[in-house]
Amino acid sequence: MGAVEIDAGRLLDDLQALREIGREGRGVNRPTYSPPDMEARRWLASRMAAAGLEAGIDGIGSVLGRREAGGVAVLTGSHLETHGHAGWLDGAYGVICGLEASRALSSVPGFADCAVDVMAFADEEAHYGSFLGARSFVGALSEAEIDAATGRADGKPLRTALSEAGLAGQPRFLCPPGRYSAFLEAHIEQGDRLEAAGARIGVVSAIVGSRLYRLVFTGQANHAGTTSMARRRDAGRAALHALAALDDRMGEGPGTGLAGPHTVWTVGRITLEPGAAAVIPGRAEVLFQVRDPDPERLDAIEAALTAQAEAAAAAMRCGVGIARIARNDGAAMDPGLRAQLVRAARARVPDHWMELPSGAGHDAQHLARIMPAGMLFVPSIGGISHHPDEDTSPEDLVAGAQVFTDAVALILRQARAGSGREGRDGG
Amino acid sequence: MGAVEIDAGRLLDDLQALREIGREGRGVNRPTYSPPDMEARRWLASRMAAAGLEAGIDGIGSVLGRREAGGVAVLTGSHLETHGHAGWLDGAYGVICGLEASRALSSVPGFADCAVDVMAFADEEAHYGSFLGARSFVGALSEAEIDAATGRADGKPLRTALSEAGLAGQPRFLCPPGRYSAFLEAHIEQGDRLEAAGARIGVVSAIVGSRLYRLVFTGQANHAGTTSMARRRDAGRAALHALAALDDRMGEGPGTGLAGPHTVWTVGRITLEPGAAAVIPGRAEVLFQVRDPDPERLDAIEAALTAQAEAAAAAMRCGVGIARIARNDGAAMDPGLRAQLVRAARARVPDHWMELPSGAGHDAQHLARIMPAGMLFVPSIGGISHHPDEDTSPEDLVAGAQVFTDAVALILRQARAGSGREGRDGG
């Protein structure tokens, strides 16, 4: 079998058609289960059907297009909803890449017995929960969690949103055991490492884990003029000292402290109460997030955060409570799939690819629980994402889909070889 | 002339009667120009009249009780409104102390030619402006400022509030040049330095100056997972580093850094935008206040704040704007009045008095612009003020009023000696 070529025009046309659904200016606004989001799901199902896939939308809103071909199968896809008023490619690119790979390979006789299924997992962008569609598909989403979930923007119960979207009472798709040899997801990078390195393809080594902490320092609000420094119990100052000390321990660069080459940490919010110019803060609340591919490094940083917060609180005669309010373990990508993606990238864009971890979470990390999973990145211009200006050059979009399709072909061939069918079906 | 004794029961009864106006639980809620505040002003005017003073309320709400006695005059007083739902003594104590001194001295034949006028300056607590009554009385409040002022709680125009309070069209009192030899104000300490030292009387050396700054750090909001630390322009981190570095330079105690023995500094508010757990702050706004009796020290701290903010911003590739949004120069108290207060305290509470600066602003700092001004403090139990729990023991309230009255008597005698009238009137 020779190389399988994708239809670049069809790929870009589909991406542009999808961009029009919920378009606002340069960007797109398709929150999960909103009318434009549901329109996008129905549009995708129709495109899947046009590609010869059996398409359906399940009870959590995920769209699955599948083929019964008799032989090996690979699952592809990503998500359709946007992160509020954001960009046109985040999620959408991976779904259309999977669709294009499925279409391209279905027209090649040598892959007639193979299925390239495509899925758009609902709510990767967490409008109502955490990876609802991906977790539902791998059997990690309970009815009780759906009962309890509400919209982050308006507090609307997820059940209400599902009902308004016409999804109430629909069954949820559960991954058929043994069907898929692999899950492969294409996505925009959302950072600028590829662009900075002049690379057009990124092969993802791991999806980093993240942990989010809420720190609450408790002191005593008091008059900012008449309360001596020695007598204060300034919760805000305790928070500042704790965060500055932790920053020192993280180090100025790789190898100089707790931080590794891929560690990132962010103080996203600080709330001082009462928040007046002339009142010593009696309470300070901090949101601190840290991400790293290595769980042991995250453990060490958590220990340092706790120690510095407690030391700073004690020095200011304040109390402190530290709660880990979210934990995302991330996932290493399958070494075999990484090797096939590298092989495909090396053939199409020699010297213009690299391996890198993903700093953002993706559906693939949940699929990795039940099957080998891999990811491919294309560059984000200026590293911008979650913003209407998010963009990738057409050449890179096409190159990414081509490498993706080549990798799917390599994986299918290897899977067929492993299943002992190659001799019978393709010999 | 022998010692003049106050009527302790009359003093405490008046304080309790005033406490009932706007009382809420243990505390009092009399915002400037509110119905209870105006009731308190009318009540005070009636008490002044009962004491033989000619009483009136002016166009900014200040209450003045005066006597035409033919000889020297001292002005006393403080304010009546509370800082929201707060305590019963802040302001009220100084007004009633002045009234009691006026009453006690008016009954002593040797002071028949002396006037102890009493004033309640409107809005020391800044519900509508900055020391409106005191500044109006010393000629430092323009009609244009009144036109522009609005309520801090509800944005109501000051003109509307004055009209609703029945004050529109009333003339404002302007201090008659040359009438007063001195202004003397009694007040609760609002801190715990007297209590900690076992002192019952504080003689105020100076009212500290304060400066309030708004720092705005500007970086770039970005994805907290995919943006490497090296590439970030984290406005929140720039703010944290600037504030921690300034804290280091202030020093851990007197003499170890920029801070002097009376310096206090407060970060009252930090606002990170957009304020989400997974988004790098693109903007950070900080309110920083510093107070000190020494303007040169405040200048040095301002220079350090600017330098540290600019250095931290540059290190994070952020911009920073620093605006001084309020400046209160404070005032040194008159050395002659301090000496008389010390003399009176030493006689009544030997070994239980001390000199100290005031960390809070007071009406006296504005009166100091046009005449010698002095202040006396009584202890605040637990250092609590601006809170319903604010309190001072009855014994200390009485001792404070007695020392205050003794000091007024000393000042009147000295003024009369200075004016050459003592021989004629009292010889």
Image: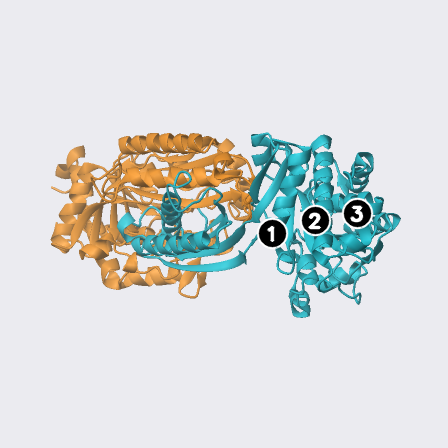
Chain colours: A cyan, B orange
At 48% from the left and 35% from the top, the residue drawn is B230
* Cα–Cα gap, marks 3 and 1: 21 Å
Q: Is residue B190 left or right of residue A350?
A: left
Q: Which residue type does callout 2 highlight?
A: Ile
Q: Is residue B3 left or right of residue B84?
A: left
Labels 3 and 2 positioned on one and the same chain: yes
Task: Name the one closer to the observer, B3 or B424.
Answer: B3
**Mark number for residue A334?**
1
Q: Position of residue B166 (x, y in %)?
A: 53, 47
Q: Nearer the viewer, mark 3 or mark 2?
A: 2
Residue furthest out toward the bottom: A144
* Mark 3 element type: helix
Q: Position of residue B269 (x, y in %)?
A: 45, 45
Q: Position of residue A3 (x, y in %)?
A: 76, 38
Vertical position of residue B258 compared to residue B383: above or below: above
Earlier along the polypeptide chain: callout 3 or callout 2? 3
* Mark 1 element type: loop
Give the residue at mark 2. Answer: A411
Task: Name the one closer to the observer, B370 or A197.
Answer: A197
At 69% from the left and 55% from the top, the residue drawn is A418
Q: Position of residue B25 (x, y in %)?
A: 43, 66
Earlier along the polypeptide chain: callout 1 or callout 2? 1
